[in-house]
Structures are given as C-alpha cells and as structure tokens.
C-alpha cells in the first residue's frame, strides 16, 4: 500500500514538473517574459500567465534593487491606459482614434487660490484672497463644498456667480477645478508646457488664460495673421443729461468712448454746456464751452481711451449747463472684448 501511495505522488510531482516546464519554456518565454526581472523565467511567470488568462489581477513582487521602466497598476478607472490591436494608445479611453488619444477626466485635483463663501440657496460666491479673474473663465466647472457648478459670471477677483443655487452653502471653503490635460515639467518640477481642459496652451508659463500664452521670445518664419474683435454701441438720448451703460468683459479690452452733448437754441444771455465721461465712477474726460446769446445750436464733446480688465464695468456720460440739454450722444468701441 505504501508503494502505491509513493508511485501515485511521484506521478503527480512528475505532472507538475512537466506542466511548469511547459509554461516557463513556451507560454511565458514567448509572451510574458521575465516578469520580476530576476533573469529567469520560472514558476512566478507561469503563475502570472495563468492568472492573466483567467482574468485575475496580481501584483508581481520584483527584486529589491529593480527599477521598472514601465509599471501599471490595476484599479479604478479601468483601462486608464489602453493599446489596441493597431498599436494606437488611449489614455482615459478604450477607443483611441489617433496614434495617441487622450481623454481628460473630471477629477477636480487643482486647488484654487484663497477660500470661498456662498449662502444656502444662493448663487453669489464671495472669495477671500481669491484670484477669480486670473484663474477662472466663464463656463469653467468647479467643485465647491461637494457641489459641482459652472461659472456664469465673474464680477471681480473676489466675486462670481455660479450656474445654480448652492444646496447647502459653504463657509470659507476651498474651491477645486480639474487639472490640466498635459503638463511637461523640468527636473525641478517647474511647468514648461501646459495644455488645460479648455485647450489653452501655456509655454514657459503656468498661465493659460488665452489659446496660446508664451513667456519668452518667439522665432517664426512666414506670415502671422490675427483678427481683432470689436464691439460698437451708439446711444442717443434726448431731453436727458445723464446716461449709463454696464459692460461685462470676458477678456481684457481697449475701450474708446466718446460723448456729445448739445443744446439747440439759447435765446438770450450767456449760456454754457459741459460734459464729463466716467469709467467705473472715475472721471476720464470732459469739455466746457461758454457762449453768448444769439446762437441756435451748441455742442460739447469728450473722448477717452482706457484699457479695461475682465469683469464688470460701468460707463457714464453726464451733460449739463444752462438748463437741460436737448440731446446726449455716447459711442464706444471695445477692441478684443471676446
């Protein structure tokens, strides 16, 4: 009985040795290779091959002094890095449509400067030490106190409006925005090339407020084509001495504003007209004209040129003099306001 028991186990050991020899010499050497970089293809690789074929996940323990050229970790999200049968690489997608296809994730891992406060059921966010105008644009998606919202209006560096009322409110909370799609850094950790989620690129800078921001000199051959966007508005108000207009700029712009105030008829005596232009409640230009009687029509004009930052601005033209003016005109042009 002891003899048959020994023969049985010898046969099982022989089968295991044959199986392992087959796996290490055929399956792994051709397809798996030296998984743990110990210069041998043995049972470790055989077991790993079986686990892969069975759809199991296993972390291979490598030598202490090994430094892998390529490591991949299983977990969530699945197929974070994917290579199809044609050799096209997908990052964040299993359907790469180019040799290298990157699909960004909404991970909210980029912390914004300062802290924000918003009341329950309110859409107005007030910041403390924030830089909303520098770090955000209209349409950006942010995370504030566990609620995802989009930016609909940026008032100034410490005030903005979100797309919907905040359900719980937030007091002195951090705000987060999704990180960049591409970030190339030097050995010191300084960003050299950045592509953000809006497709804006920064070279030599971490600022990506425009489609291309370059910190440094540019050398180019050929022609450079550019188009300036402008907005023109003409306001004509009769029988009033004051007119105002609010502006909301999505990007910095050069404002050119002019105003004209007139009086049709002064029958007698010495009369006068005056005009003043205001930008954000600061005087930007004006004119004054005194004249004697016998004139049928008089006019004063003023012009101002000023560069404005992104955000909300107020334009105002004031016209006065001897009696109520008969008419007031205001025109303005903004270059690069889109």
Image (cartoon, grey):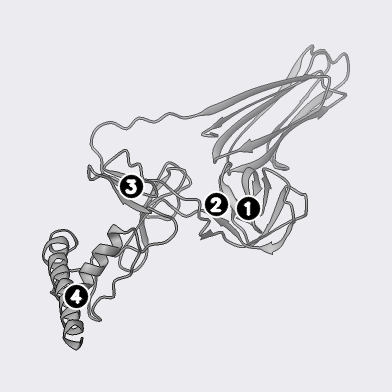
Please say if the residues under marks 2 and 1 sit with CB atoms less than 8 Å apart. yes
Q: Quadrant of residue 77?
A: bottom left
Q: Which residue is mark 1?
A: 157
Find residue 120 and report its horizontal and vertical position in percent: 78, 54
Question: SS for tag 1?
Answer: loop
The residues tagged by marks 3 and 1 sit, at their Cα atoms, a distance apart of 38 Å
> Residue 114: where, in percent of width, then height?
61, 62
Quick one: label 3 or label 1, which is nearer the N terminus?
3
User: Upstream in the sequence, badge 2 or badge 4?
Assistant: 4
> Which quadrant would residue 267 be assigned to in this image?
top right
SS for dot 4: helix
First along the sequence among labels 2 and 1: 2
Residue beneath disc 3 = 90
Q: How many marks?
A: 4
The front one of 180 and 275 is 180
Q: Which residue is mark 2?
A: 134
Cβ–Cβ below 8 Å for labels 4 and 3? no
């Amino acid at each position: 009985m002891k003899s048959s028991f020994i023969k049985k186990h010898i046969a099982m050991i022989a089968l295991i040795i044959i199986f392992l020899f087959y796996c290490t010499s055929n399956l792994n050497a051709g397809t798996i290779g030296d998984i743990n970089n110990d210069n041998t293809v043995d049972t470790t690789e055989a077991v790993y091959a079986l686990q892969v074929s069975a759809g199991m996940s296993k972390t291979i323990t490598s030598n202490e002094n090994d430094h892998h050229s390529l490591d991949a970790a299983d977990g969530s999200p699945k197929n974070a890095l994917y290579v199809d049968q044609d050799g096209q690489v997908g990052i964040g997608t299993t359907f790469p449509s180019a040799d290298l296809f990157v699909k960004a994730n909404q991970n909210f891992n980029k912390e914004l400067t300062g802290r924000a406060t918003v009341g329950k059921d309110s859409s107005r966010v007030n910041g403390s030490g924030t830089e909303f105008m520098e770090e955000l644009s209209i349409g950006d998606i942010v995370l504030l106190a566990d609620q995802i919202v989009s930016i609909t209006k940026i008032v100034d560096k410490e005030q903005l409006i979100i797309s919907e009322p905040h359900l719980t409110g937030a007091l002195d909370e951090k705000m987060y925005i999704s990180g960049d799609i591409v970030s190339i850094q030097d050995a010191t950790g300084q960003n050299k090339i950045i592509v953000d989620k809006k497709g804006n690129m920064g070279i030599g800078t971490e600022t990506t407020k425009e489609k291309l921001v370059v910190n440094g000199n540019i050398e180019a051959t050929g022609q450079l084509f550019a188009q300036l966007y402008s907005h023109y508005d003409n306001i004509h108000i009769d029988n009033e001495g004051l007119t105002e207009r609010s502006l909301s700029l999505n990007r910095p712009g050069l404002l050119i504003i002019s105003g004209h105030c007139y009086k049709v008829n002064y029958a007698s005596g010495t009369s006068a007209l005056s005009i003043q232009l205001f930008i954000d409640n600061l005087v930007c230009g004006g004119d004054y004209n005194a004249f004697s009687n016998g004139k049928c029509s008089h006019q004063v004009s003023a012009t101002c040129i000023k560069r404005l930052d992104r955000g909300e601005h107020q334009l105002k033209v004031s016209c006065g003099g001897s009696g109520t003016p008969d008419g007031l005109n205001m025109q303005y042009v903004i270059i690069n306001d889109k």
